[in-house]
Image: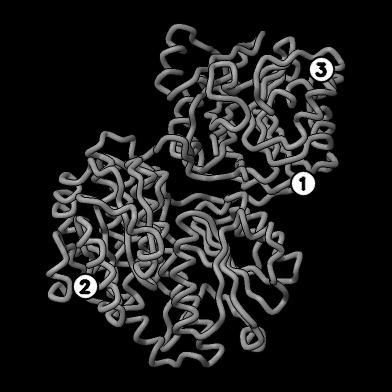
Amino acid sequence: MCGIVGYVGEKDATDILISGLKRLEYRGYDSSGVAVYDGRNINVVKTKGRLLALEGRLKDNPLSGRLGIGHTRWATHGKPSDINAHPHLNKDGSLAVVHNGIIENYVELKNWLTGRGYKFVSDTDTEVICHLLDYFYEGDVLEAVLKLVSKIKGSYALGVLSKNDPDKIIAVRKDSPLIVGLGKGENLIASDIPAILPYTRDVVIMDDGDIAVLTKDNVTFYDYLGREEEKPVTHIDWDIAAAEKGGYRHFMLKEINEQPRAIRETLRGRMTEGGFNLDGIDLPEEYVEGLSKIQIVACGTAYHAGLVAREFFERYIRIPTTADIASEFRYRDPLVDENVLTIVISQSGETADTIAAIKEAKKRGSKIFAITNVMSSTVARESNYVLYTLAGPEIAVASTKAYITQLAALYMLGCYIGLKRGSVDTQFARKLQLELNAIPDKVQEILDEQQDIQRIADEHYNSRDVFFLGRGLDYAVSMEGSLKLKEVSYIHSEAYPAGELKHGTLALVEKGTLIIAVATQSTLYEKTLSNVEETKTRGGYIITLTQGDKDVFADVTDEFIKLPKAADFIMPILTVVPLQLLAYYMAVARGCDVDKPRNLAKSVTVE
């Protein structure tokens, strides 16, 4: 969560900091600020609210200098306010700090510092960092940082300025993403690559336990013991335009419409004659045959992709599979050992709970197979095997193309495992390949008719409650459809297994209640129909998603959303697209901030 940008060079720092923070807005925030060294003092301007408010304050209080740090904050400790916004200063204003993450022992440290005369002006955990650096500073800011990291516990990415070391930025990373951009006569730090692309394409992805000291002409890396390190440089070859709207009203709509391309990119080069080449990954046959089960771990949308995979793996690959929300997995003493393959799914690769789950599973002897969209992310580096989804940058907080490419990757991985175990044959693999190859054009068919979904959204955007119903794979997709609707439109929505209606949910259905019935699994039509009828007789307004079998549901359906035909097992990739569009257009009709929903962030790097 949050965004950090830092700059040292010959250009005006303020303009670069604001430009970089704008490219990190997708991460979610509720306040922002910058600190710039003007040659004599560190000057700070910060405010609650969007960057527009910060820019307004900077017009009244312009900052000048060639060295600075900036931050967008998503509140954890202390409410959103001007005082709690970053950057934070030490007692005499000689040190400025920006921080992403959580300092777990901040109460203990705050009490200790208060006993030594330090006064706190904010409610944040970050302020202890400023005062600890002040306490440890004896003429060398790097030495103070080394002492600092031996005392603080938790997750953090830090940017530090000191007017006593006026040509440097110090960056520190532990469990929260941070990169260094290597320029000519200038260097930068940022939470994510888009922030620095206008200035350089050469970046160093910092690892946990890295410290970087940046001047305009040099970057030196150290470990927590102060030993110098060599770090590999990554050249970024995708264009900044890939992270801009490209004429669409919102990033979310752009990314929904990019899904045919994203699927093609994720599939390209990964299909062989009767099988799959997962970027050269080779799970030993004896290991795969000896697996007792597969454990899938993820959060939010990625977890919903895992639910689809669980159904597919068990029904078609015939291997016991469980799916866990990562934040629960690590605390329930899971039955995971060396005979269990743990699959973790994360768009950003920096999801804190997922990273913690990886460590828990590895501790128990399990190998980790990661599916992520971000190369060199923490999830990728911590895993034994990595299959990248090639969705490209995803900026909108609500995940769309990342989800659909995660499904594609999971189908390929499942079939790969099934072939190794002998539970599926090459005939099934070829059928899966044909179905996957057809998906981009079928998704495009849905996108070409999205005006019909917009019309439905315009008619129902004032709904108070929406219920999604489905069975099997349709239930897994219903959960994702419900999440999309609630997170971008703020409409209360829930997803239920259709067969559970009689166990309480029917009490919530009244005249006019909007029911989204997802019915793509042909073997379950009859059962789903009877459940939908139960809501219809109680006054529900029924919208049915089905793959052309309208006659089955004609008597109980008020509106149809017709889907292209495909094999039942592949339908989740198609079904989710109109649900994404429905959520988007209902949110737009309600005047919501679609790309940056309230209280949410793109990359959840705290627990």
Question: Does label 3 or label 2 sit earlier along the sequence?
Answer: 3
Q: Indicate which label's residue lies in the foreground, 2 or 1.
A: 2
Question: Does label 2 or label 1 sit earlier along the sequence?
Answer: 1
Label 3 sits on a secondary structure element that is helix
Q: x, y percentage for residue 341? A: 63, 74
Nearer-the-camera pick, 571 or 456? 456
The quarter in which the N terminus is drawn is top right
The disc placed on residue 162 is: none
Q: Which residue is mark 1?
A: 229
Residue density around tag 2, few if under 14, some if 14–19, many if 20 or more, within 10 Å? many
Residue density around tag 1, few if under 14, some if 14–19, many if 20 or more, within 10 Å? few
Q: x, y percentage for residue 56? A: 41, 14
- Tell me the quarter of the picture where residue 566 sits: bottom left
Residue density around tag 3, few if under 14, some if 14–19, many if 20 or more, within 10 Å? some
Type of the residue with mark 1: Glu
Q: x, y percentage for residue 75? A: 56, 30
Label 1 sits on a secondary structure element that is strand
Q: Is residue 179 visible?
A: yes
Q: Which residue is mark 3?
A: 114
Type of the residue with mark 3: Thr
Q: Which residue is mark 2?
A: 547
